[in-house]
Image (cartoon, rainbow, N blue to C red):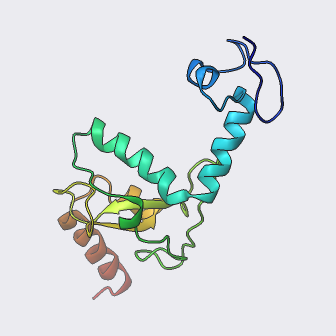
Amino acid sequence: MQKFCRKCRVELTAENSTPAVYTSRNPHCKVCWAQRDKENRRLHPEASILRRIKGNAKVRNLECSLTVADIPPIPKRCPVFPWIKLVYAVCIKRHDGSPALDRMDNSQGYIKHNVRWISNRANTLKSDASDKELEALGDDVKRRKNPL
């Protein structure tokens, strides 16, 4: 039985579709499937990021009990670095202004009331630094600006 892409009507083969797509009741070719996926990620960024976070939590053996409703809306600016505007973009490499879902208390997993949106830049800077190290860095900046 021949199957055709629901959108572009091209005949589906093993080369132009994935097995899961080919056997589904809603078949698409690889090109149309990628476009559909990209559009879904653009329209529903929280759901898209939640899928990625759940996979990350599983690999890192962290609790992840979040639902889309638990994720706060993405703010316009980073709360850590207010001069950075947060912009969610699909199919563009992450940049300093990309929103990142941050765990405020790293001893806990991705649970309600333990996540917030910050910029990718802020998340990268705090990724492997302790609070003590970050405070020492801030103290050093203050000393350099106000030498005795």
The vertical placement of 80 against 130, above or below, is below
Residue placed most toward the observer, 118 or 3: 3
| 74 relative to 21 in the view: left or right | left
Q: Position of residue 77 (x, y in %)?
A: 52, 76
Q: In which quarter of the image is residue 1?
A: top right
| 112 relative to 29 in the view: left or right | left
The residue lying at 64 percent from left, 21 percent from top is 22
Residue, far right:
9
Q: Where is residue 66 in the image (x, y as percent from the top left)?
A: 32, 57
The vertical placement of 115 against 47, above or below, is below
Q: In which quarter of the image is residue 104?
A: bottom left
The answer to whether residue 89 is seen in the rendering is no
The residue lying at 47 percent from left, 72 percent from top is 73
The residue lying at 48 percent from left, 54 percent from top is 47
Q: Position of residue 49 (x, y in %)?
A: 47, 52
Q: Where is residue 112 in the image (x, y as percent from the top left)?
A: 27, 65
The vertical placement of 26 against 142, above or below, is above
